[in-house]
Image (cartoon, rainbow, N blue to C red):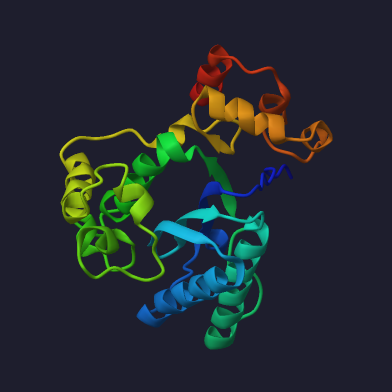
């Protein structure tokens, strides 16, 4: 079965998702959501990750993570395996909790971080689990728009993309996110290249330059054709359309 490459380097930003096995639940109680965040906190202390945004849904999660060190795989293995062990013991179950490996999309921080943060904060609204993003209790949205900021969330980078006036930042972010409630905004994930890169042409080129050709050529790598081919804007558009 084809699997995506993992591109890791210092300062990389990722949109990370994982779903429950056979689309089953991964969170069963309020305590489970809190426990998952405790494992993120522990991973932050252990590996130095920066969590920009998150939303925890019933059967999947979205995280936007920055890695000052080259260690995304270690971070996600720690979080997912720790939470799986906790759930299996608590629920007296065995086997996999998550469906396969987590999915990580490398994100162009300068051009897509703000938009992607809005997209994941609106996920509960799109799923009809809340009328407004602030109504959903298991996301980082309130850390951005209220004084109830969680220590786990690093919000300054995203807020400073809207304004450098600290006192006005929360209101600017609220307006930015909730403006999308009145009009349908296309998912930024529709622009992902090669199944793993979200960015402009320059960012994609720089990312592809980091890949070792022998890793791309292996048969089990998904989207290997796109990842090893010369890149031009026509190819980017074609790949996104596909």
Q: Is 45 in front, or is 198? A: 45
Q: Can residue 61 be seen here?
A: no
Q: Quadrant of residue 31?
A: bottom left
Q: At 17% across and 45% down in the image, what residue appears? A: 175
Q: At 25% across and 46% down in the image, what residue appears? A: 164
Q: Position of residue 32 (x, y in %)?
A: 43, 78
Q: At 70% across and 35% down in the image, what residue appears? A: 210
Q: Quadrant of residue 193?
A: top right
> Quick check: 15 left or right of 176?
right
Q: Position of residue 36 (x, y in %)?
A: 48, 73
- In the displayed structure, would residue 143 be above or below residue 238? below
- In the displayed structure, would residue 190 be above or below residue 147? above
Q: Is 230 in front, or is 51? A: 51
Q: Quadrant of residue 92?
A: bottom right
Q: At 40% across and 59% down in the image, what residue appears? A: 54
Q: Is 59 in front, or is 236? A: 236
Q: Position of residue 122 (x, y in %)?
A: 29, 50
């Amino acid at each position: 079965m084809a699997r995506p490459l993992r591109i890791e380097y210092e300062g990389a930003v990722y949109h990370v998702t994982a779903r429950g096995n056979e689309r089953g639940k991964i969170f069963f109680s309020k305590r489970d959501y809190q426990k998952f965040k405790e494992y993120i906190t522990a991973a932050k202390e252990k590996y130095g990750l920066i969590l920009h945004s998150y939303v925890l849904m019933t059967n999947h999660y979205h995280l936007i993570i920055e890695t000052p060190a080259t260690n995304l795989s270690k971070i996600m293995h720690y979080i997912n395996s720790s939470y799986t062990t906790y759930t299996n013991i608590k629920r007296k179950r065995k086997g996999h909790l998550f469906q396969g490996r987590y999915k990580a999309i490398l994100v162009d921080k300068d051009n897509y971080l703000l938009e992607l943060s809005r997209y994941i904060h609106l996920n509960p609204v799109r799923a009809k689990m809340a009328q407004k993003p602030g109504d959903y209790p298991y996301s980082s949205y309130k850390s951005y728009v209220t004084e109830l900021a969680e220590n786990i969330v690093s919000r300054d980078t995203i807020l400073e993309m809207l304004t450098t006036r600290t006192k006005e930042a929360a209101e600017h972010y609220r307006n930015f996110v909730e403006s999308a409630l009145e009009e349908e905004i296309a998912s930024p994930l529709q622009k992902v290249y090669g199944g793993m890169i979200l960015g402009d042409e320059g960012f994609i080129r720089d990312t592809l330059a980091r890949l070792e050709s022998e890793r791309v050529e292996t048969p089990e790598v998904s989207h290997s054709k796109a990842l090893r081919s010369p890149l031009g804007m026509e190819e980017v558009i074609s790949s996104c359309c596909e």
